[in-house]
Image (cartoon, rainbow, N blue to C red):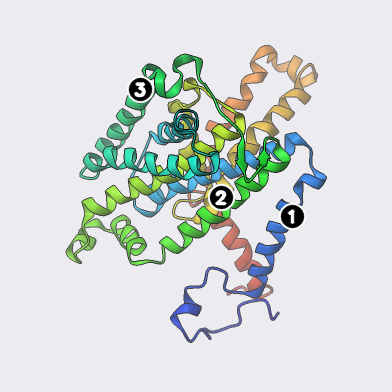
Amino acid sequence: MATLTPAGDFRTSYRADMTIFPTRGSRLALWLGLALVAAAPLALGRYELGLLINIGIMGIAALGLNILVGFTGQISIGHAAFFGFGAFASAYAHEAWHIPVALCIPLAGIATALIGLVFGAPAARLKGLYLAIATLAAQFILEDFFARAQWFTGGVAGRITEPFALFGWVADREESFLYVVLAWIILMYLGAANLLRTRDGRALIAVRDHYLSAEMMGINLAYYRTLSFGIASFYAGIAGALYAHYLLFVSVEAFNILFSIQFLGMVIIGGLGSVMGSLMGAAFMVLLPEVVQAGADALAGGAIDRALKLGASISFLREMAVGAAIILFLIFEPDGLAHRWRLIKAYWKLYPFSH
């Protein structure tokens, strides 16, 4: 019981009230989770490690989009384009300027943030449907740029990238690259959690909750809306650079509008306005197609397959499941997985009492 929050509020300082992990149990769970992920290469194969790496990379990008959509109340349908720009920027910086890959990743994030500010400045004065169309235009503009700027992206042939290396240590396998992604996850998620506790973070939330009241309190709406685009683009650029140096190849076709919709699905399923929910939504969206594919393989050639005459269409269940999951979450769990997790924790904290 000592690890649970006792009845009443015994916090006597602002620092204690703003702590990220308020109980000893939450801190122990954090260290245990990090230890399990760090020990994963000892027990898991390359396929399972690849899933963990993809969850981490997508979780960073989804967190950036959640800062824009969940915490600031904006909308973006072009997040995949900024993700792709970060991937190409890191690959180009290493090949053209011979910058070490370890430095190319943060530089790609900064370059993507600048591009995000360019598109965010005019979009900051828009809202609703007009803002969605503006971000959709950014998606198509960057897609066309990727296809035409052969010097930057390699054109339709794509661009080969180099593995992550630092002081002679090369992360060219899943067993080693997992630690690179884990380090960036810790850095980016701690950065986001602390950002939201600052003056600027509270201003972003105020813009989301009621922009007229925020403006009356002296908050510059255009500035903070543009800032949220820059932060979201920075996170997308970092994730894209990690993605490029993990696959060792980036192609123009990968960063399309469907990829942007998947990022929105991660934020919706994980929970709008939740740092932890971004990672939960990314894990759900990465693992769901794999589970559905396993189920489709089990059904193929079976009695259900023959009775419904699914045939070749059974392979499309993988794509259909993603759209169905988004719709079901919007109907039955609009607050996302993070909200459900908070309810589960509250239940066990209050058990056997009902209040």
Point 67% across, 72% down: residue = 351
Q: Is residue 54 visible?
A: yes
Crowding at mark 1 (Cα within 10 Å: few <14, some 14-19, many 20+): few
Q: Compared to 45, does 299 lie above or below?
A: above
Q: Is residue 256 left or right of residue 222?
A: right
User: Where is mark 2, residue-wise?
Assistant: 184
Residue at image location 73% in from the left, 29% down from the top: 295
Q: Position of residue 355 (x, y in %)?
A: 58, 75
Hey, what amino acid is under mark 2?
Answer: Trp
Judged from the image, the secondary structure of the residue bearing numbered disc 2 is: helix
Q: Nearer the viewer, residue 45 or 105?
A: 105
Can you see residue 327? Answer: no
Lower sequence index among marks 2 and 1 = 1
Q: Left or right: 92 with respect to 286?
A: left
- The label on residue 145 is 3
- Cα–Cα span, label 3 and label 2: 28 Å
